[in-house]
Image (tube, rainbow, N blue to C red):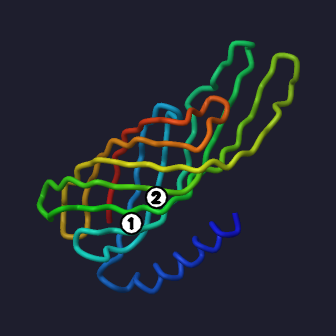
């Protein structure tokens, strides 16, 4: 966990150095996934070349409803992902395809509700996460674009109702 914190701090300092330059870019996206019904993510970084973006991001993933197990136990899990992202955009035009890869982890907080207990029990887990995405950008002006993408997520382990493999669809704004 200390390594991730150090990497995050190092990356933030690096981004602040590049912020005044032309290469800075940020993203804010809203998505719908197979495990978490609602996902809000942001990623900030720099374009090293016109076609290669490197950034770091975080977000909040929440379910719309509680997952119910066979013994009538209900589980409510929320996740805060922390990831590094690399994105390749082959060319610049009004409609531009892209491929993206993310590596990092998710901090998962789960509340377990049983019929016998009035107060939920909670557990905390950190799982590794690797994601790949294929998407399309619609450039609005020089520095702004709308994007949509389809992602596949692979986790190091399953936690309660969160499976090791999941899929999501996201839309957002790049600025």
Q: Residue at point 49% right, 35% down?
A: 165
Asked whether the beta carbons under mark 1 and mark 2 sit within 8 Å of each other, the answer is yes
Q: Residue furthest front?
A: 156
131 sits left or right of 48 in the view: right
Q: Which quadrant, please, contains the N terminus?
A: bottom right
Residue 9 position in % (x across, y down): 60, 76
The location of residue 11, given as percent across then percent down, is: 52, 75
Q: Is residue 101 left or right of residue 165?
A: left
Q: Which residue is mark 2?
A: 42
Q: Earlier in the sequence, mark 1 or mark 2?
A: 1
168 vs 31, nearest the viewer: 168
Image height check: is 14 above or below 109? below
Please tell me the numbered disc located at residue 119: none
- Residue shown at the point (87%, 17%) measured from the top left: 116
Above/below status of 14 relative to 120:
below
Nearest the camera: 131 or 122? 131
- Name which residue lies at 39% across and 55% down: 101
**Residue 104: where, in percent of width, then height?**
54, 57
**Under tag 2, what secondary structure?**
strand
Does dot 1 land on a helix, a strand or a loop? strand
Please report the residue visible at 38 percent of the width from the left and 49 percent of the height from the top.
132
Residue to which mark 1 is pinned? 26
Label 1 Cα neighbours within 10 Å, binned few <14 / some 14-19 / many ≥20: some
């Amino acid at each position: 966990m200390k390594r991730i914190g150090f990497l995050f701090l190092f990356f933030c300092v690096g981004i602040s150095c590049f912020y005044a330059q032309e290469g800075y870019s940020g993203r804010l996206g809203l998505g719908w996934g197979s495990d978490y019904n609602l996902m809000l993510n942001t990623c900030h970084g720099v374009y090293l070349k016109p076609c290669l973006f490197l950034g770091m991001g975080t977000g909040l993933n929440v379910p719309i409803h509680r997952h119910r197990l066979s013994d009538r136990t209900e589980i409510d899990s929320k996740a805060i992902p922390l990831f590094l992202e690399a994105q390749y955009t082959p060319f610049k035009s009004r409609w531009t395809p892209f491929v993206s890869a993310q590596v990092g982890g998710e901090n998962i907080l789960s509340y377990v509700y049983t019929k016998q207990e009035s107060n939920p029990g909670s557990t905390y887990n950190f799982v590794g996460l690797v994601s790949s995405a294929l998407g399309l950008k619609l450039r609005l002006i020089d520095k702004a674009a709308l994007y949509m993408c389809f992602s596949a997520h692979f986790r190091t382990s399953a936690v309660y109702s969160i499976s090791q493999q999941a899929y999501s669809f996201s839309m957002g704004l790049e600025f």
